[in-house]
């Protein structure tokens, strides 16, 4: 109702006032249009450069790699701040090469994933620069047999239709958040050979993206910041 009242007040302005305001703003509007075009061209160039980097990075990925990213939205910035040791990345998944294509399995919640189920996204979709600032590729120095077991575990969770855990409760296995999904795939897929320290904020216990990528057997292979 308030919006309608405001609108009605605006359209009752005298015509002379409207003409005056238009003449005063016209020069500014032209400047704004030019600025908008420059911003659009700069954004287009930014996206093109980022996709070139993403395509190069994709060729570097191996089975079982941990793929990380940082979104440019408020939620992502808040999530990465929860990391206790390394606040670089806000999200992670596990890479799988299938028929010469790279996919990333990851748990995602919110409006980005309406059905809340674990996703299997092409690498380029996972890393896209429209809503992300950077990506990372990390690799565990373990036997291929363990990597295969980890991938099979991750895919089992995916096929089971496990949904995103909005409660961030490590004790439950029927729902998982992003780092929890990767953590349990690594831990259970390796039959407990890979163990990870857990983070704490007060009495709240959780697994952070940094708890995974800072494991002694996990090495950073690539870090791409979109510029």
Image (cartoon, rainbow, N blue to C red):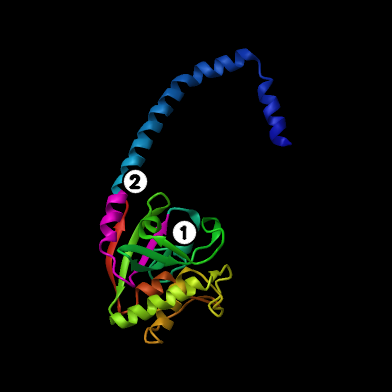
Q: Is residue 193 above or below residue 63?
A: below
Farthest right residue? 1
Identify the residue shown where x is 31% and y is 82%. Answer: 145
Q: Quadrant of the N terminus?
A: top right
**Mark 2 packing: few (<14 Cα in 10 Å), some, or many (20+)?**
some
For marks 2 and 1, give the CA distance.
Answer: 20 Å
Is 69 colored magenta in this rendering?
A: yes
Any part of residue 220 in sight: yes
**Mark 1 packing: few (<14 Cα in 10 Å), some, or many (20+)?**
some
Judging by the rendered image, the residue that carries numbered circle 2 is 47
- Which is nearer the eye, 197 or 165? 165
Residue 78 located left or right of residue 130: right
Farthest bottom residue? 192
Nearer mark to the viewer, of 2 and 1: 2
Decide which of tag 2 and tag 1 comes sooner along the chain. Answer: 2
- Which is nearer the eye, 152 or 1? 152
Farthest front residue? 99
* Mark 2 element type: helix
Identify the residue shown where x is 31% and y is 71%. Answer: 63
* Mark 1 element type: helix
User: Measured from the top left, where is residue 10 in percent x and y?
Assistant: 66, 24
**Highlighted magenta segment, given as a residue range:** 50-71
Q: Is residue 146 above or below residue 132?
A: below
Any part of residue 227 in sight: no
């Amino acid at each position: 109702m308030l919006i309608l009242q405001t609108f009605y007040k605006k359209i009752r302005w005298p015509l002379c006032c409207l003409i005056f305001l238009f003449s005063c703003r016209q020069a500014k509007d032209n400047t704004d249009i030019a600025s908008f075009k420059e911003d659009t061209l700069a954004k287009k160039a930014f996206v093109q450069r980022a996709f070139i980097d993403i395509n190069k990075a994709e060729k570097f990925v191996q089975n079982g790699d941990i793929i990380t990213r940082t979104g440019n939205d408020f939620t992502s910035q808040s999530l990465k701040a929860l990391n206790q040791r390394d606040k670089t990345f806000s999200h992670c998944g596990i890479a799988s090469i299938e028929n010469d294509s790279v996919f990333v399995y990851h748990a995602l919640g919110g409006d980005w994933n309406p059905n809340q189920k674990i996703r299997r996204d092409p690498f380029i979709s996972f890393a896209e620069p429209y809503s992300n600032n950077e990506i990372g590729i990390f690799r565990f120095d373990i036997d291929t047999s363990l990597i295969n077991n980890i991938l099979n575990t991750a895919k089992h969770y995916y096929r089971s239709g496990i949904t995103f855990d909005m409660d961030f409760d490590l004790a439950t296995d029927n729902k998982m958040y992003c780092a929890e999904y990767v953590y349990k795939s690594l831990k259970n897929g390796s039959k407990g050979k890979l163990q990870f320290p857990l983070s704490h904020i007060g009495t709240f216990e959780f697994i952070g993206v940094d708890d995974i990528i800072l494991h002694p057997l996990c090495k950073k292979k690539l870090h791409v910041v979109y510029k």
